Amino acid sequence: MTAREAHHRHELRQSLKIVRDNPFGLPHETASQVVGALNQDLASMITLYQQYHKHHWIVEGAQFLELHLLLEEHYNQLHDQFDQVAERIVALGGLPVSGPAEIQEHAYIKHEDPGMFDLREMLEHDLAAEGTLASHLRQHIELASRLGDYGTEALLKAILEATEKRAAFLEKHLQEESLTRGIPAR
């Protein structure tokens, strides 16, 4: 292989900052704004996915199996959802964030500190991250709607509904035991 052939093999075809034309007829400015918002969602969902995965691996205690399986369900669901978001970004003419530095730069959910926390604290971190994700999804749904990108709006609405459901499940696990609630203290 010549040096010229090697150079052409590694030539950048599109950078993260470039949004190409899309087959949907959405204006370039619309697609660019939506791709920017979706990349924030994608990076944040990947961050939350990694956090759930960590918690799934290290969960301990009396509710180990139930929470181990719940956390696995949550990270699998997030994986499927962020895959859909990444595919939507590509369909809109953009490139999805993928490397660790890009993800950290674009995410509005930050990685939990390294190490193991008490189970309650880990679930509280997950719940707070789900709330942050839901808040930004609502903003991005409104943006997509305002810009006339109804396909992205529908995708994000479905993801929001699942996000709220995950948050509700976590919130239930963080409540006091219902068998002891309402029993007068002695």
Image (cartoon, rainbow, N blue to C red):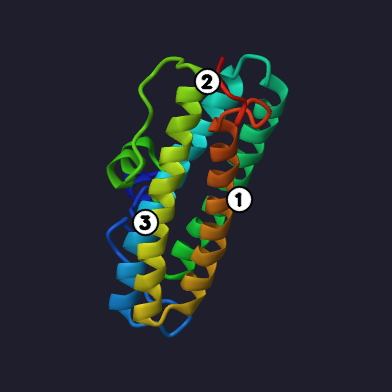
Which label sits on residue 119? 2
Residue at 64% over, 25% down? 180
Dot in front, 1 or 3: 3
Q: Earlier in the sequence, mark 1 or mark 3?
A: 1
149 and 9: which is toward the camera: 149
The crowd level at tag 3 (other Cα within 10 Å; few <14, some 14-19, many 20+) is some
The residues bearing labels 1 and 3 have C-alpha atoms spaced at a distance of 19 Å
Task: Tell me the mark number nearer the camera, choosing from 1 and 2.
Answer: 2
- Rounded to the nearest whole Å, what is the CA distance between mark 1 and mark 2? 25 Å
- Among the two numbered marks 3 and 2 on one chain, the one whose residue lies closer to the N terminus: 2
Of the 4 image quadrants, the one containing the C terminus is top right
Other-residue count near label 2 (Cα within 10 Å), few / some / many at <14 / 14–19 / ≥20: some
Residue 58 horizontal side relative to residue 31, left or right: right
**Picture coordinates of residue 178, whole percent (x, y):** 65, 32
Tell me the quarter of the image containing the N terminus.
top left
Query: Is there a contact, CB below 8 Å, between mark 3 and mark 2?
Result: no
Amino acid on which disc 1 is placed: Asp
Q: Residue at x 28, y 42 (%)?
A: 105
Which amino acid, mark 3? His
Q: How far apart are marks 3 and 2 (CA)?
A: 26 Å
Dot 3 falls on a residue whose secondary structure is helix
Please indicate whether residue 22 sits to the left or right of residue 106 in the image: right
Q: What residue type is labelled 2?
A: Leu
Does the rendering let one see residue 95? Answer: no
* Image x and y of residue 152, in percent: 47, 70
Residue at the spot of label 3: 136
Regarding mark 1 in the picture, which secondary structure is present there?
helix
Location of mark 1 (residue): 80
